[in-house]
């Protein structure tokens, strides 16, 4: 009987996992200092964000350009920036679902001359493997000749959460379900033995 209670205690005290959905944001920034007027727009996706309140530091799983002025050339590596050759920075700070800080840079090879470079930088200067740098507070997309550019940091980028996910629900882990089943069988057959 003691063993049954011990098994039941262990089964109930096993941890539960939290299931979290991916969270996505739309972003946009306008040209102020570049050679091309217009707006760059895109999406940022964070897979399995670890906090149910969407608070903490995260790495973007995917950043995709959805719209840019026509004269900014499209990279041969496509519009999914997280697939580009060089990604020296990829960090976002989120507070209750709001992006409050970021540093992301991506460059398509070759870098000299640059095919395409993208920066969202609210932090300090960081460098790519060659002479390209993403300066403090720079938001940039282009190839060095045709580009959209501003130095407004987070104040010059609009981030909008795309349909927040439903609240996460605790889900028992598979081993817990197996142990519960095993405990039920042991209890069932144990009670049958006691009755005989």
Image (cartoon, rainbow, N blue to C red):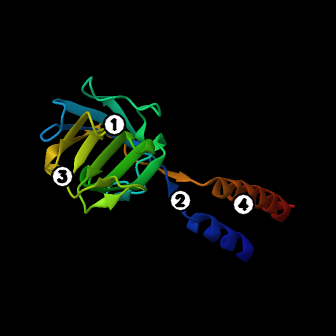
**Looking at the picture, how far across and down is residue 117, in whole percent?**
35, 43
Q: Is residue 66 visible?
A: yes
Please state which of residues 50 and 40 is positioned toward the viewer in this rendering: 40
Determine whether label 1 and label 2 are within 8 Å by CB. no
Mark 3: secondary structure: helix
Determine whether label 4 and label 3 are within 8 Å by CB. no
Of badges 4 and 1, nearer the viewer stands 1
Distance in Å between CA atoms under marks 3 and 2: 40 Å
Q: Residue at x 37, y 46 (%)?
A: 167
Of badges 3 and 2, nearer the viewer stands 3
Q: Residue furthest bottom?
A: 2
**Looking at the picture, how far across and down is residue 73, in whole percent?**
34, 28
Q: Which residue is mark 4?
A: 183
Q: Residue furthest right?
A: 196
**Residue 4, above or below 108:** below
Q: Which residue is mark 2?
A: 16
Mark 1: secondary structure: strand
Q: Earlier in the sequence, mark 1 or mark 2?
A: 2
Distance in Å between CA atoms under marks 4 and 1: 47 Å
Q: Which mark is residue 153?
A: 3
Label 4: how many Cα within 10 Å (few below 14, some 14–19, many 20+): some
Mark 2: secondary structure: strand
Of badges 4 and 3, nearer the viewer stands 3
Q: Which residue is mark 1?
A: 43
Of badges 1 and 2, nearer the viewer stands 1
**Looking at the picture, how far across and down is residue 161, in whole percent?**
27, 40
**Looking at the picture, how far across and down is residue 3, in whole percent?**
73, 74
Q: Earlier in the sequence, mark 4 or mark 3?
A: 3
Q: Earlier in the sequence, mark 1 or mark 3?
A: 1
Distance in Å between CA atoms under marks 4 and 3: 57 Å
């Amino acid at each position: 009987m003691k063993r049954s209670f011990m098994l039941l205690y262990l089964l109930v005290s096993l941890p539960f996992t939290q299931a979290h959905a991916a969270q996505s944001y739309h972003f946009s920034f306008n040209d102020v200092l570049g050679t091309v007027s217009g707006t760059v727009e895109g999406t940022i996706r964070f897979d399995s964000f670890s906090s149910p309140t969407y608070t903490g530091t995260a790495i973007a799983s995917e950043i995709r350009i959805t719209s840019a002025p026509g004269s900014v050339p499209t990279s041969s590596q496509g519009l999914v920036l997280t697939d580009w050759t060089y990604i020296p920075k990829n960090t976002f700070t989120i507070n209750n679902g709001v992006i409050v800080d970021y540093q992301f840079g991506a460059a398509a090879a070759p870098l000299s001359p640059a095919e395409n470079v993208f920066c969202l930088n609210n932090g300090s200067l960081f460098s790519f493997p060659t002479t390209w740098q993403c300066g403090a507070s720079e938001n940039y997309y282009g190839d060095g000749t045709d580009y959209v550019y501003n130095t407004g940091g987070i104040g010059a980028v609009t981030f909008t959460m795309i349909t927040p996910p439903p609240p996460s629900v605790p889900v028992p882990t598979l081993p817990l379900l197996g142990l519960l089943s095993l405990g039920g069988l042991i209890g069932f057959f144990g009670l049958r033995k006691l009755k005989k």
